[in-house]
Image (spheres, coloured by chain):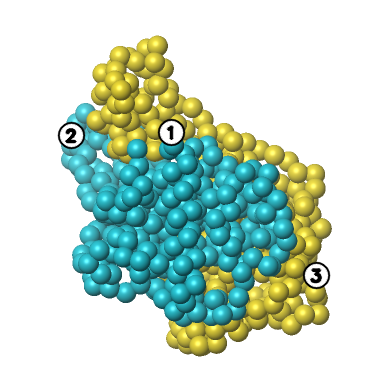
Amino acid sequence: MEVAIISGKGGTGKSSVAASLASIAKNVLLADCDVDAANQYLLFQPQHTEEEVFVSGQKAEIDYSVCTQCGNCIDLCGFGAISETDGKVMISEITCDGCRLCMRICPVHAISMKDNNKSRLYSGTFRYGHMVYGRLAPGEENSGRLVSLVRGKAKQIAAKNHYDLVLYDGPPGIGCPVISTITGIDKVIIVTEPTLSGKHDLERALETVSHFRIFAMVVINKFDLNLEISNEIKQYCKLNNVPIALLPFDPIVTEAMVNGQSYVEYAPQAEISVLTENIWKYIQNAKP
Amino acid sequence: MIDLSKNIKIAIASGKGGTGKTFVSTNLFNALQHANIPATIVDCDAEEPNVHLFLHGTLQKTTNVFLNVPVIDESSCTHCGRCHEYCSYNAIFHVPSLKVISVMEELCHGCGACFVACRDNAIHAKQKSLGSVTQIMINDQCCFIEARTRIGVYSSVNVIKAAIAEAKSDQIVILDSPPGTSCPFIQTANLADFVVLVTEPTPFGLSDLKQSVETLSQMNKMLGVIINKSGIGNTDVYDYLKEKNIPLLMEIPFSRDIAKAYSTGVLITSTDEDQQRGFLELFEKIRQQLWKSQS
């Protein structure tokens, strides 16, 4: 079974809930698909890690010993990445999308492509099983493709080690990395919070998920910070036939994180931990 | 040179989501508005735009943002395969033996390479909608611009750029940036004069802050940090800022009242004069940082 935890809005407690679900499920392959801001490895300190280079894309580079400053590339670049500054044709590394058109049309072959190769894909073991995570190097792009690689690696390790469960900690938002995370999985848990932003983003996240016909469940984290909005979210989910669970605001979530543990490990008797166990039971038995 | 009396673009960003980025950007904008400083706020978090939940005004206009994607005219196509070869995004599917060629629009980045590649005049452009840019006037000198990506569209970068381009150049422009450190964040930060990173004093917050700082340093961007929900977690973030010599612009203590007000769409700078002063001080500090760098 493949289960993803996503959130729409960031900072709703998605990663904390995911870490706790992994602690409850045990014997799990945990894959951190939040490659912009991977955090699970901070809590679970994976061992025996293997490292692979991820080429996230390419950037165009001009060899000025060859360039004749003809400027043909400037007009053709669809991203506005090439300009002439003080009589010199320059490519902005930040704006270049790596499409290679300038390299192909340069009459004197002065342009070549350079790999972005600072991003990494890691895999290793941790206290409940195996872990796979990607880290996108600062400024590198294509996080959706890195997510696909994280998932590919996760499935490969899961098959080899006979894991029945693969848990994905997803990225925020509803764009490319999220779509890569949830494509073809069985169940998704959307963690939200009772704020206008949380509600709005949840609606967009549910709409995105509905394109994929995946079983979805909503968790309102910190529901007691605003009961009114929690109720509105409940109504919305009821109307759309989406099952829902509530978790209270509890400072132990942050305390647990500071102590390098999931909150279920740190305070197994706490109400939030017990409720999280119930969520896990429900998800396990839910029919996709 | 940046004219510090008027035109400053300030991006409010965070590596980790939910640290209070929109809280800071909407309140900063609101404080400027109350102080009669002409300002524009641009919601660049186009996947999950939220600024509209806090600001209300008169709808000015909505424009669609399009991408030019290729359409292949099969009657002229000779199946030479050059467009397929030119496409760096695998968006053109080609099986020469079966004479099958088709465009996968969702993979297309609109680079235009296939148009250049085709020698048979078999490719023309079609406009695909990526999302919209909406302009709302808050009063006669303050404006709110929202970038909103269509659900199911892969990249929000074009919509974000179109939204920022709509902002007046003679005003203070606040960019509510998308989270993370990938394409949408970089394209937003790239257009800013100063980046404010909002973080929280927890291990996750610090780890994500480091990643944002590294990214911005590579871009040679000026930056400062706001610690939100101070009092929770630990002091590692403070040590990191000292070690890296990064200015701490503001601290916002964790408070259930602030969280509650925010959750219902109320801006504390509208209801609390001390908060309003605090956000104007933040603006002054940012200006001083920029001024220091220029002198």
* Left or right: B17 as drawn, with respect to A128: left
Asked which secondary structure carries label 2, the reply is: loop
* Left or right: A151 as drawn, with respect to B105: right
Give the mark toward the camera: 3 or 2: 3
Q: Which mark is residue B30?
A: none
Residue A148 screen position, x and y as percent: 55, 49
Q: In the image, what residue type sits under mark 2?
A: Asn
Q: Is residue B26 visible?
A: no
Give the vertical position of B205 relative to B267 (above or below): above
At x 31%, y 51%, the residue is B6
Q: Chain of mark 3?
A: A
Q: Are marks 1 and 2 in contact (CB under 8 Å)?
A: no
Q: Nearer the viewer, residue B113 or A143?
A: A143
At x 42%, y 24%, the residue is A61
Q: In the image, what residue type sits under mark 1?
A: Glu
- Image quarter for residue B256? bottom right
Q: Nearer the viewer, residue B150 or B293?
A: B293
Residue A282 screen position, x and y as percent: 66, 79
C-alpha distance separating marks 3 and 2: 66 Å
Give the mark toward the camera: 1 or 2: 1
Residue B187 screen position, x and y as percent: 41, 46
- Image quarter for residue A255? bottom right
Q: Which residue is mark 1?
A: A93
Labels 3 and 2 share a subunit: no
Within-10-Å neighbours for mark 3: few <14, some 14–19, many 20+? some
Q: In the image, what residue type sits under mark 3?
A: Tyr
At x 57%, y 49%, the residue is B247
* Left or right: B10 as drawn, with respect to B198: left
Give chain A's shade: yellow
Q: Which residue is mark 2?
A: B121
Within-10-Å neighbours for mark 2: few <14, some 14–19, many 20+? few
